[in-house]
Each structure stands twice: as C-alpha cells, then as structure tokens.
Amino acid sequence: MGGTEKADVTIVGGGVIGLTTAVVLAEGGSRVRVWTRDPVEGTTSAVAGGLWWPYRIEPEALVGEWSLRSLAVYEELAADAERTGVRMVEGVHAELHLDGLGPWAARVRGLRAATPGECAGGGLWARLPLIDMPVHLAWLRERLLAAGGTVEERTVRSLDEAFDETPRVVNCAGLGARDLVPGDPIRPVRGQLVLVENPGIRTWFTAADAASATTTYFMPQPGRLVLGGTADDGDWSLKPDPAVAKDIVERCARVRPEIAAARVVGHLVGLRPARASVRLEREARADGRVLVHNYGHGGAGVTVAWGCAGQAARLVTEATA
C-alpha cells in the first residue's frame, strides 16, 4: 500500500493476533493498516513463552479448530526457523492425560503418554511449535509490509477514530479492549518470567497447578532459557517481584537441578488479556461499516492466532462481499 493509496481495513492492535489477522487480510487482497500503541516488539505478545498449546482458553468447541489451523501453519514455518522464529521442539506436559483433553488432541501428530523416563509423575510427550516471539513478531510485520500493509504506532482512544478513516475495523486490542469497549469483562492475568543462560536444556517442560496461580515451565529459546511462571488474575503490576522470581527458579530447578546455577540475564512481566471466552464476532454499524472483534485470547494467543485470523478475515470480507 504505497503512495496515496488509502487503507480499507484498520487493525487496532499490533500483537500476534493483530499482526496475523492483518497478514491474512492483506494477502487476501485487502489494503490493511495496523495501529499499535506499542512497538511490535514491545507488545504483551513479545513476553509470551511461545509454546503452542490450548491453555486456559474458551470456548472449547471452537478453540480446537483454531488451534489446529495454527499448528499446521507453524509446522510449515518451522522449515525456516531462523527467519520465522518457529521451531518444532520436544517436551513434556506433566500430569496431563489424553483422556482429559478435547477431540483436537487426537489430531496432534505424535502426542502420547510420556514414559517414566520422560516424566516420572506421568504426563504427555509432544513435539510442538516453540516460538521465539520477538523474532516471530518482527517477521509477521515484514510479511505484512511485503503484502502492501502498513504499521503505525498510534494510541487509539475510541474505535470511532479508526472508522473516521476506514469502513472496516478489526479490534485486536487485547487488554486495550477494556478502554475501547466500555463494560467489557476483559481482565489481566499477570505472568512473570525469568530469563537465564541455558545450561544445555533442549526440551521444554510444563506443569500447571490448578489449585494456585503458579505454573512451572521452562522453554529453551535461542540464546536463553525462559522460566515461568505465574497466572495472577486481576493483577496489573508490570514490575518483576524478586521473591516471585526466586520461587520460579527454585521450582524449575526441582525439575532440572542444573537450572539452579544458571546465570539470570533478565526478567519479564506480561499481562494476558483474559475473558470468560474469546470474543470473535462481527458487529454491523451504520452506513454499511463493519466492526469485527478478535480479542480475549488470554495466554493462548499464539496458539490460536492463525485460526482466529482466518475467521476474522472471513467476517470482514463476507460482510462487504
């Protein structure tokens, strides 16, 4: 979209949901502009651990298909891991069992019960996409630009600002939807991470405690090992808590003792945009204008990004066909 050519779709939000939706629309022939409050690498998505898995996200009846569509895309992108940030990596979900998952699990190739050597307490072994989010977000932005889209850093205080310039708007604002959709029940679920030098760990591990706000996981990303985590419902603090960081390292070290001596190289905090269920729907406005909502994915945005993007794009284009 060069020169004076105007956009016909505005995407509000530059995280993984907004950028993926923008790419699908732009490659489908729409003239797309993304408005993002923060630089792409500074969004909540950039803080995510990056493992594909349908985690704490509803509605279950739709999430499976969204997730599987995204899985298929990531499997293809993993062929060019250095550029896309997507790698297929083995690991274990502790204490999970196949009969406790939805029908989607039967379509994940290789997903099976972990052996005692892989996870003493039982769990699931899988080879899944593990995504280096800063790299992936930058790649999505470049793919959008190559398709003729644009990205502009802009704070949006009302969706009407977008409608003043384009007849079609997609609300991918994540937690920012709280200000753009008055009364919406979206809320933060705070996640804290610790980055350490990787002592040689090549597999990922997760263990969620359903009775508390803590999760234990480590993800081997290029140049670092990401340790987590927390799921603090309603907590808006973006400041890392040293006591929480210490506890995260200790929990991870109980699984892999070599983590205890790993040098800490950074701390991250992100606020997951959580709702009782994802809001993905079209809202007709006056004069033929179209608003599509695509937000509230919690900590599973990267897991469902391509599936949700495809559905959002259909809602936009079908409304104007």
Image (cartoon, rainbow, N blue to C red):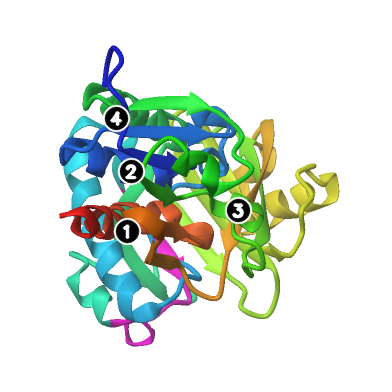
Q: Can you name the residue that lies furthest to the top here?
A: 3
- Where is mark 1, residue-wise? 308
- Where is mark 4, residue-wise? 144
- Where is mark 2, residue-wise? 20
**Mark count:** 4
Q: Quadrant of residue 166?
A: top left
Residue type, mark 1 in image: Cys
Image spot of residue 21 (x, y percent): 32, 46
- Per the image, is 95 magenta? yes
Residue type, mark 4 in image: Leu
Residue type, mark 3 in image: Leu
Q: 312 left or right of 219?
A: left
Q: CA distance from mark 2 to mark 1?
A: 9 Å
Residue extent of the magenta highlight: 89-102
Helix, strand or loop for disc 4: helix
Mark 3 packing: few (<14 Cα in 10 Å), some, or many (20+)?
Answer: some
- Where is mark 3, residue-wise? 180
Image spot of residue 167 (x, y percent): 35, 45
Please tell me whether residue 151 is drawn above or below residue 220 in the rendered image. above
Q: CA distance from mark 4 to mark 2?
A: 8 Å
Q: Are marks 4 and 2 in contact (CB under 8 Å)?
A: no
Q: Are marks 2 and 1 in contact (CB under 8 Å)?
A: yes
Helix, strand or loop for disc 3: helix
